[in-house]
Amino acid sequence: MVRIAFVATLLVGASVAGAQARVTIPVPTRVGGTARALQLEGFLYRPRGTGPFPVVVLNHGSAAGAPKESWPAARLAEYFVQHNMVVVVPMRRGRGHSEGVSLESEERNCDPTSWRPGLDAAFADLTAAIDYARHVAGADSTRVLLAGVSRGGFLSVAYAARGARRSSITGVVNWVGAWVAQRDDRCPRDFNEISFTEFGGDARAPMLWLYADNDPYNDATSIEKYARAFRAAGGKVQFVMCRTVPANGHSLPDYPELWRNTTDAYLASIGFARR
């Protein structure tokens, strides 16, 4: 049996801007036939008060060549804290100061099955983050919103459809979500489209998808196909294509003035209105 300990360390100074606490999130795993807990780095943000507060698990994108760089996501986390939500930001295995080796390849590969190991490992890490929230004072882990950027947005949609704790998922906010860069890879079969079609048949939570038309990784035509495929398969999604992102479209999360009002309305529609 793996003994699981949940640790929260208060941050000192501005080493991680705006974060309330750096935390350790254990993931039960097996290494060489031996059970152990893989330790993930995470960041925890809490509103004032005693709660109970719904939980947001905020998922990062790919490493983009900097696997040891942590992503505290302070600005996005603050948005949700203002809605009286507890925010957990896990660094998946091999990212930042998390233990383990990432299985999330960033190399071009047109075999759709090749992406499964990385996605399975990401599912396990996300399950651990949701379980961690059960131990956070004032958090209501029966009401979980998944949110994510880029690969983390894709992961949030995928987990809501097929994750081990999907029954607790109330909603999803997906910023520019995709697991692969189809615009670069130009694969004859688009893994993103294949996956979103499959997830649409299993997902039950209503979702908000926020994309932009000048994304260097997935063009507007492909992005629109993802939303249509997901919806046609039965998924419930409000899809927004922003066309005025000052930088490239993949930086949409950095411009809250373009998505704040829409996201406020979506959160209110699923019972997470700002107080």
Image (cartoon, rainbow, N blue to C red):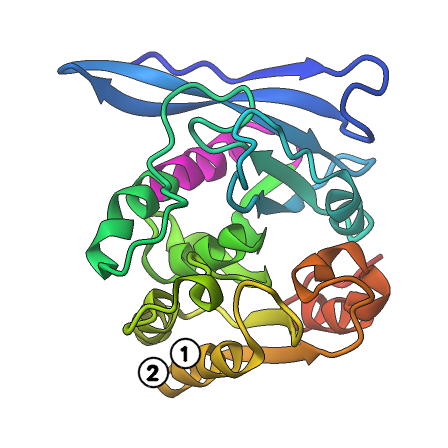
Give how far across and how far down residue 191 sits, in percent: 33, 65
- Residue 134 magenta-drawn? yes
Secondary structure of the residue carrying numbered label 1:
helix
- The answer to whether the residues at label 2 and label 1 have Cβ atoms under 8 Å apart is yes
- Judged left or right of residue 133, residue 235 is left
Residue 268 in view, yes or no: yes
Residue at image position (80%, 65%) is 260
- Judged left or right of residue 153, residue 197 is left
Give how far across and how far down residue 171 sits, in percent: 55, 63
Give how far across and how far down residue 246 sits, in percent: 83, 66
Magenta segment's dominant SS is: helix
Residue 137 in view, yes or no: no
Q: Who is closer to the viewer here, 215 or 234?
A: 215
Q: Amino acid at mark 2?
A: Ala
Q: Quadrant of residue 109?
A: bottom left
Q: Who is closer to the viewer here, 82 or 271?
A: 82
Give how far across and how far down residue 29 sits, in percent: 27, 23
- Residue 102 magenta-drawn? no
Secondary structure of the residue carrying numbered label 2:
loop
Q: Which residues are magenta?
A: 123-138
How many other residues sit within 10 Å of disc 2, few (<14), some (14-19) or many (≥20)? Answer: some
Residue at image position (48%, 35%) is 129
Q: Who is closer to the viewer here, 258 or 52?
A: 258
Residue at image position (43%, 83%) is 231
Query: Which residue corresponds to mark 1?
Result: 230
Residue 172's place in the image compared with 77, above or below, is: below
How many other residues sit within 10 Å of disc 1, few (<14), some (14-19) or many (≥20)? Answer: many
Q: Amino acid at mark 1?
A: Phe
Query: Which residue corresponds to mark 2?
Result: 233
